[in-house]
Image (spheres, grey):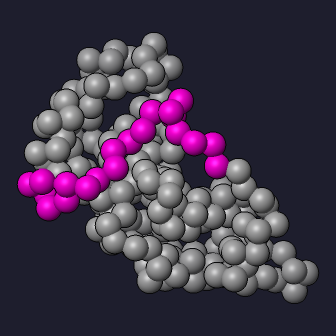
Amino acid sequence: MFKKSKGFGDSVQKHNMAKLLGDETIIWRVPKENQLIVETDWDEQRKRIGEIIGFDEENELPSVDDQSLTVYGNYLKNNLNSPCYLTGIEDFSWEESYVFGYMSEKEHTKRRKSTASYLDTFRLIKVIVDPKAWSDIGVEVQRMEDGKKFELSLSYLEVTDRKSPNFQLLNDYVVWYWNYR
């Protein structure tokens, strides 16, 4: 079983790729054990979410549905600051067998060359608000390690810079999405 990936090379190669893609100030994925723990006051978070999507007649946050996803997605589309760098919150579904040790790390590394991984760092290109096509808010992202583009579900991602205003915006969305769907 493995817990860390060596990614796509050392920091010099990553810096060169970021320069090629037009941004040398990227904050790369920080190992979970080195990240700050973010304390969240649920009442404050609930209030922020409610200011975006409103409350129902019983003063509760609405469930995840086409209408609330559209409202939230349009809000994020208009309020996420650029550049916005994202990474996986936890392993993507295709990676579970690798993370839990059923498959080899070598095979995981090979598959990551063509598939987005939770270990990758992505630059947000655009927010996709289309509840008929997505059961989530979608995002088009570019992997910073090699420049490949992917469409991913936003609820599986977090902002790499915890000091960025984008971090709280996305964290609020993810908490609402997973608790109200």
Q: Residue at x 26, y 55 (%)?
A: 25
Residue reaching furthest to the right: 58
Q: Does residue 5 sit above or below 125 in this rendering?
A: above
Q: Residue at x 79, y 61 (%)?
A: 42
Query: Magenta span covers which residues?
Result: 19-38
Residue 156 image position (x, y, % from top left)? 50, 51
Q: Note whether residue 147 is visible.
A: no
Instruction: Classify residue 129 by image quadrant.
Output: bottom left
Instruction: Classify residue 110 by image quadrant.
Output: top left
User: In terms of depth relative to the viewer, which is nearer, 154 or 8?
Assistant: 8
What is the chief secondary structure element of the magenta stretch? loop
Q: Is residue 29 magenta?
A: yes
**Drawn side of residue 92 relative to residue 177, left or right:** left
Q: Is residue 33 magenta?
A: yes
Q: Residue at x 50, y 33 (%)?
A: 34
**Drawn side of residue 179 relative to residue 4, left or right:** right
Residue 172 image position (x, y, % from top left)? 63, 64
Looking at the rendered image, the quarter that the N terminus falls into is top left
**Drawn side of residue 64 relative to residue 163, left or right:** right
Q: Note whether residue 32 is visible.
A: yes
